[in-house]
Amino acid sequence: MDIEMLELSERKASFILKNSTPAMANALRRTILTDIPKMAIDKVEFHLGPIMVENKEYESITPLFDEIIAHRLGMVPVPTDLELFVPQSKCVCGGEGCPSCTIMYSLNKIGPCTVLSGDLIPLGDPSLKVKDEFIPIVELADGQAVLIYTIATMGTARTHVKWQVANGVGYKYAPIVKIDTGKCGNCERCLSECPKHVFSRDSKRTTVAEPLKCTLCGSCRTFCPSGAISVDADEKNFVFSFETDGSLSAEKVINKAVSLLSEQAKDFGKLVENF
């Protein structure tokens, strides 16, 4: 199994999984979706009672229930360092909470204003400040305020979607699109019928310009009057793509997914040997 990168940015990746099988491709997809660990806000503590700011009293209340605000905070992407943080169940602190398994944030705002994710202030390392700073949490009217303390812990999407790192994880068979130049009459019908603009026209003939964009719909083959176009699926190569929420880079997600699959395969092999 090999990987050929097509696109790799901070939050987006596209690659070809070569010399593989549908079973392995789906295993990789499910691993990226559910098994990549990340930090997410899991505990939220709301201050109750009046809040004094510069000799003015604010009421600790918002238009939303506390549970809704807590849910929104849980979905805010939290920066994750897989080499620094560990799940609480595996931490030397025994799950009590320490800098190796938790991140604490405070949120202190007075109205009128829109409380944003960027108002979360990490208690300690400033590099742990959330990257998406403009996610709206709640609107505060004049005289309203919130004082919140949160704790982020590590988990996976098998437990809750707030620990899901990647989204839009999908793959398809690598398309094989060919034009029989002996049959092609250069009518250019395929250029207008193809929804993904796979074909183009150079100075001499119609060519397959973007074969990886093909979705195997077969429109070009259907509307080609001379039957010059063939569209097939390569059952050993798969085109993958996904995006992350920003808590981890796309490169780290791929590396971690491959590492997890390798570990699971070794564990399964040991179980078979000991059976």
Image (spheres, grey):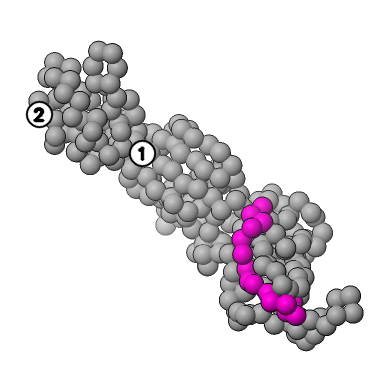
Q: Residue sitting at 56 percent across and 61 percent down?
A: 163
Q: Which mark is residue 225?
A: 2
Whole-angstrom CA distance, mark 2 to mark 1, is 30 Å
Q: Nearer the viewer, residue 65 or 176?
A: 65
Q: Residue sitting at 56 percent across and 45 percent down?
A: 11
Q: Nearer the viewer, residue 264 or 61?
A: 61
Q: Is residue 116 visible?
A: yes
Local secondary structure at mark 1? strand
Q: Point out the stretch of residues depicted in magenta.
A: 131-146
Q: Amino acid at mark 1?
A: Phe
Does the stretch in magenta take in 154? no
Does the stretch in magenta take in 142? yes
Q: Residue sitting at 34 percent across and 29 percent down?
A: 210
Q: Is residue 221 left or right of residue 125?
A: left
Q: Residues within 10 Å of mark 2 (few under 14, many from 20)?
A: some
Q: Amino acid at mark 2?
A: Pro
**Residue 187 at x, y = what percent?**
16, 23
Judged from this view, the residue extending furthest toward the left is: 226
Q: Dividing the image into 4 quarters, which one contains the N terminus? A: top left
Mark 1 or mark 2, which is nearer the start of the sequence? 2
Q: Dividing the image into 4 quarters, which one contains the C terminus? A: bottom left
Q: Which mark is residue 238?
A: 1
Judged from this view, the residue extending furthest toward the right is: 55
**Residue 61 at x, y = what percent?**
70, 82
Judged from this view, the residue extending furthest toward the bottom is: 49
Local secondary structure at mark 2? loop
